[in-house]
Image (tube, coloured by chain):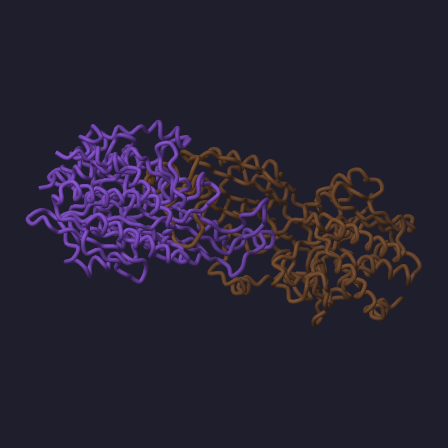
Chain colours: A purple, B brown
């Protein structure tokens, strides 16, 4: 049997140098001035895929940033695995907080620092190099492989759903393989079998046509902030339970089995509280932290603002106030249905004198898969065992990767979320990095997984 | 009898030119770069007072901006009237909204446009010129007159209270005369017999030591905005009544007499609602708009903010949230006592997981005077009759001029608030102006008032 550990060891410097090259391209999808960089990053990936031995490598233009596809379909009778990932990255500000420039990749200690190091170029790169390794070592692949790497994940995957629909046949697969998530912690691998969905809305309240002086008008006219506070206060009870009628209708009660699975994570709530310097954890009665995050929906105020924000005081009665709200959804909650219920609620409790404007935003369903009888998921969990010395746990993530639910619906119900990041690698923040321990182990785990499929 | 109307008509051009000179000096007390302008504005006033015939003209330095004093004490046995006003002005931004530059005074139609035109240089100037007129016409004054004109009214009169205390004897008077308020509307003069007091505080809530991702933490940790909304929602009922225990303890119930006085204003609530495009007036049950403003205290949210305020949505759990609060106080409410009660309330209802920081700010008592048996106030109201064709109404103002309560306590209980501004003259806003009709009538009314005192 081929010793992949030795192979990857020998090629490590070269591969890291290549990854750094890719990470040097500032492929920030959100900023239009980086459009040429997006193209360069896509071309770099296409060249890599070609060099790795993939076929039909193609840079597919969209109305946004291109999608890179490739395949290697020479394992007749074997399953087809589609690898999904993204080559776009988050913006980098505040730049002054970066210890080394975000697009000048640097290894410090056992970590590779750069924007995109873990989210998601570093993790996509693992799949390219794992496939290359097998092809170089064995001359063939144990399965059929397809790649579909987009450039708009950080801007809501605007053009990918249509691309999936239009290319259903070309992209058809038995499973989708994604590395864009994390281990639970160092040495504690996890495969996420659930991602929360999402819906968002903005609420504006207008009262008067101008800000008013609180001396001349205070006590006699509506204050947009009072109205906003009154409105928002109706959304939760003191524990954070959402009071919108019907909000929990399509949420599944936690089964004993799921509770047991959550229990296995051995999550340390006290440490979390200390790390974040919280005076208390906070959430719905009767659930642990991991249960609240993994299996319960939320309605969060992400931003509330109105009136004077400067230094000192200003005796103003603000004419308008704003709130930004997102919900994390679970199980069968339908984002549109949830939005409708929230809107109905807000309109029903509208305060006196308030003109209400509600603007719905994003919508994404939750993703869920039952690992108990899914052979590929079980094999994926097994693949970690020999590399990490411990089998991957099946977890539920609190975050949302809307495109995963899309893939599970359009391409294949089985989406395998083998994440090799760590939760504290500063995704979306300054000093993003990738622990090279998981770079090394990730390569081996992917090879192990692919080779285990028959 | 001297015809003052003719006198002022003949001197009108000259006097307006002089006022424009004063208005050209950008005496913005809040901005340190204008410190030399503050001195120039004080000197200009001192020169005018001297030219008018006042004596003991003095520019009194303080740790802030100087206070200009002067007197004319040659009416033995007659009352002494101290004129108070201010020569400092508000900042002028946003500058681009000014039709003519704020410090290049310009008469357009029958209005004089400039920062300070009505608040308060224009109104102080009336007193200087009224006294000058009497001295020129009669060779003496019917009363003893003192002037005390400060340069820090727009920055909370920081040094005036100490100055009053230290110079009690020099400033001793039977009444204080102030023109820094408004007519009710054009042709409808008013003398304010009440000003609301004020207290302010800032409330901050901190939860975690960092903003958190709502995917990884939403539903399991405190959200500073949820806590802030929960906290602030306890402060009012749906009508705006303040729910802080003991808040109304020192508020006097409205007497039938006061209700009748408010009624006299004939305030048009429907017009107010239309002008401000309100869907409803809003306030405590059982009170009219003028009663709410004139005789009821408030607790207003002037600013609330936390979390994301940019375009679109951001799935953040904010680590902190802020609120700015001011109260307007009436009757015997003690600002410190009210602050204490609010703080006790907030601490009692502090939400789970919230670290509360409360920073008290300004404090000022309400001013109130009963005009029914006050001879000087009755004479002041009468003085308007021949000039405006209608007697001044006694009103209660919703705004606060903290120094007025100070004067009433330290110098003389009788403070006569003869305002010659109009409510829509853009005080503190771009395009501040002074209606020249009230410039002309103000001069005559002051002369009439002073000559009526015996």
The extreme bottom residue here reads B109
Is B251 in front, or is A351?
A351
Q: Is residue B120 left or right of residue A209?
A: right
The extreme right residue here reads B139
Q: Is residue A269 left or right of residue A52?
A: right
Is A234 in front, or is A366?
A366
| Residue B94 seen in render | yes
**Above-or-below relation of B339 to A408:** above
Q: Is residue A98 left or right of residue B152?
A: left
At x 45% / y 38%, what residue is drawn?
A99
The extreme left residue here reads A77
* Residue A97, position as x, y percentages in the image: 47, 40
Is B228 in front, or is A230?
B228
**Quarter location, residue B438:** bottom right
**Above-or-below relation of B102 to B403:** below
The quadrant of the rendering that contains the C terminus of chain B is bottom right
Is B401 in front, or is B210?
B210
The quadrant of the rendering that contains the N terminus of chain B is bottom right
Q: In this view, does A31 lie to the left or right of A136?
A: right
């Amino acid at each position: 049997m081929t010793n992949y550990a030795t192979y990857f060891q020998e090629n490590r410097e070269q591969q890291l140098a290549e990854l750094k090259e890719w990470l040097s391209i500032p492929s920030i999808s959100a900023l239009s001035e980086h459009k040429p960089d997006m193209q360069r990053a896509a071309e770099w990936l296409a060249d890599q895929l070609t060099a790795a031995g993939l076929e039909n490598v193609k840079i597919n233009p969209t109305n946004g940033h291109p999608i890179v596809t490739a395949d290697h379909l020479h394992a007749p009778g074997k399953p087809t695995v589609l690898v999904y990932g993204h080559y776009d990255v988050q913006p980098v500000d505040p730049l002054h907080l970066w210890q080394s420039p975000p697009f000048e990749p640097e290894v410090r200690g056992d970590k590779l620092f750069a924007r995109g190091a873990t989210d998601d170029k570093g993790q996509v790169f693992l799949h390219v190099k794992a496939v290359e390794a097998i092809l170089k070592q064995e001359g063939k692949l144990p399965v059929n492989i397809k790649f579909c790497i987009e450039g708009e994940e950080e801007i809501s995957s605007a053009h990918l759903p249509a691309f999936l629909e239009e290319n259903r046949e070309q992209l058809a697969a038995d499973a989708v393989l994604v590395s864009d998530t994390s281990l639970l912690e160092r040495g504690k691998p996890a495969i996420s079998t659930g991602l929360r969905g999402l819906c968002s809305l903005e609420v504006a309240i207008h009262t008067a046509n101008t800000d008013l002086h609180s001396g001349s008008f205070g006590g006699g006219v509506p204050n947009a902030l009072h109205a906003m506070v009154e409105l928002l206060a109706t959304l939760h009870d003191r524990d954070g339970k959402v009071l919108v009628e019907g909000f929990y209708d399509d949420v599944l009660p936690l089964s004993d089995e799921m509770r047991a699975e959550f229990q296995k994570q051995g999550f340390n709530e006290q440490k979390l509280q200390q790390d974040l310097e919280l005076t208390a954890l906070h959430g719905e009665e009767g659930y642990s932290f991991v249960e609240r995050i993994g299996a319960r929906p939320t309605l969060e105020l992400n931003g509330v603002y109105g009136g004077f924000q400067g230094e000192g005081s200003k005796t103003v009665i603000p004419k308008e106030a704003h709130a930004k709200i997102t919900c994390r959804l679970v199980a069968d909650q339908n984002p549109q249905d949830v939005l409708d219920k929230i809107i109905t609620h807000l309109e029903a409790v509208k305060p006196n004198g308030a003109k209400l404007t509600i603007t719905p935003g994003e919508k994404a369903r939750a993703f869920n898969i039952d690992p108990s009888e899914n052979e590929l998921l079980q094999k994926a969990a097994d693949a970690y065992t020999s590399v990490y010395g411990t089998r991957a746990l099946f977890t539920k993530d609190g975050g949302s990767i809307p495109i995963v639910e899309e893939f599970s619906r359009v391409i294949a119900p089985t989406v395998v979320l083998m994440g090799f990041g760590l939760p504290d690698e500063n995704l979306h923040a300054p000093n993003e990095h990738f622990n090279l321990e998981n770079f090394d182990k990730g390569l081996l785990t992917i090879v192990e997984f692919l080779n285990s499929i028959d």
